[in-house]
Amino acid sequence: MGLATCAALPGGDKDDAYLTQALDRMGLAYAWVEWNSADPATLHEDVDLLILRSPWDYPEHHARFLQWLEALQVPVHNTPQVVRWNSNKSYLLDLASAGVPAVPTQIIEDPTRDWPMPEGFAEVVVKPAIGVGSMGARRFRSADLDAARAHAAELVDSGRPAMVQPYLPSVDAGSETALIHFDGVFSHSITKGPMLTDEGQRPLVDDLYVMENIDHREASDTQREVAQRALAAVPGGIPLYARVDLIDDDEGNPIVLELELIEPSLFFAFAPAAADRFVEAIRTRL
């Protein structure tokens, strides 16, 4: 079995130590695979299954990463179909069309096109539609429309579409909750503090993602129901692993902020038995 990562993390993220320990306990051999240098034509000679874990540099090489996945001659999870769909945050529009409550989202592909600020909100977030770890995300007051549009244009000019969302006050109040699932079954949940502050973005870790403030949180029945609705809308069926990030809307109802299906941190440290649950799910794919 292969665990896909990037060149900056040849041994994976530290949280995945729980995963590799679970693999060892169950007698499953594994090897870390740096996708940047692995030959897709021959990788099947070394591994019989590939699990995406920490290829966190893929946004800078988006097209090449998708081509690499689709050229592999070995089963991949989550699948290339899911990765292609989930790697552009326009999937939030698909969720909304399917009736899943989600943060209102605009996708900006033309830097010359005017777009309206979301109405009724004091602040907005502008960030890459293809990105990880809040890299490139900025928070603007609604009165700063010119600055927000300039940032969106910079992102589009750099080769990636931009996205615009209202910044919901519940994020600062600590509403963000991430629900982790394996084979569509809820495993555990955590809470994340705000990534963007009034002073700007939190510090970066290894130039790969924004530092996170994490703690344990029990998900409510309503949050779990919204997460299940989001997973049911994923094209190609229920994914092997998923993290559904929720925040509260202005009425206190949970809505989807992001649906993480490619390389999410799964926060095993907050539920060590979850790594065993993940490995059991993996074994069904072998």
Image: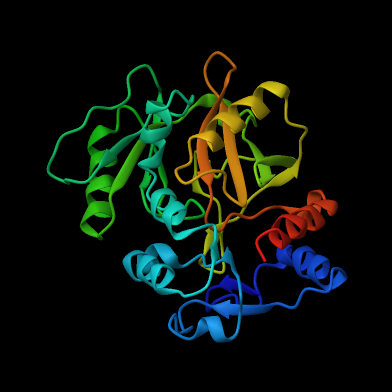
Which residue is at 67% across, 29% downward?
224
Q: Is residue 157 above or below residue 6?
A: above
- The answer to which of 152 and 66 lies nearer the viewer is 66
Residue 163 location, quadrant: top left
Which residue is at 49% across, 76% downward?
35
Q: Position of residue 105 (x, y in %)?
A: 36, 33
Residue 125 location, quadrant: top left
Quarter holding the C terminus is bottom right
Quarter holding the N terminus is bottom right
Q: Is residue 197 visible?
A: no
Q: Is residue 158 visible?
A: yes
Q: Is residue 61 above or below residue 254?
A: below
Judged from this view, the residue extending furthest toward the top is: 251
Which residue is at 73% across, 62% downward?
283
Q: Is residue 277 above or below residue 257?
A: below
Please count the marks in the image.
Answer: 0
Q: Position of residue 51 (x, y in %)?
A: 60, 66
Judged from this view, the residue extending furthest toward the left is: 112
Classify residue 200 as left or right of residue 94.
right
- Look at the image and name its color scheme: rainbow
Q: Is residue 182 above or below residue 3?
A: above
- The answer to which of 248 and 184 lies nearer the viewer is 184
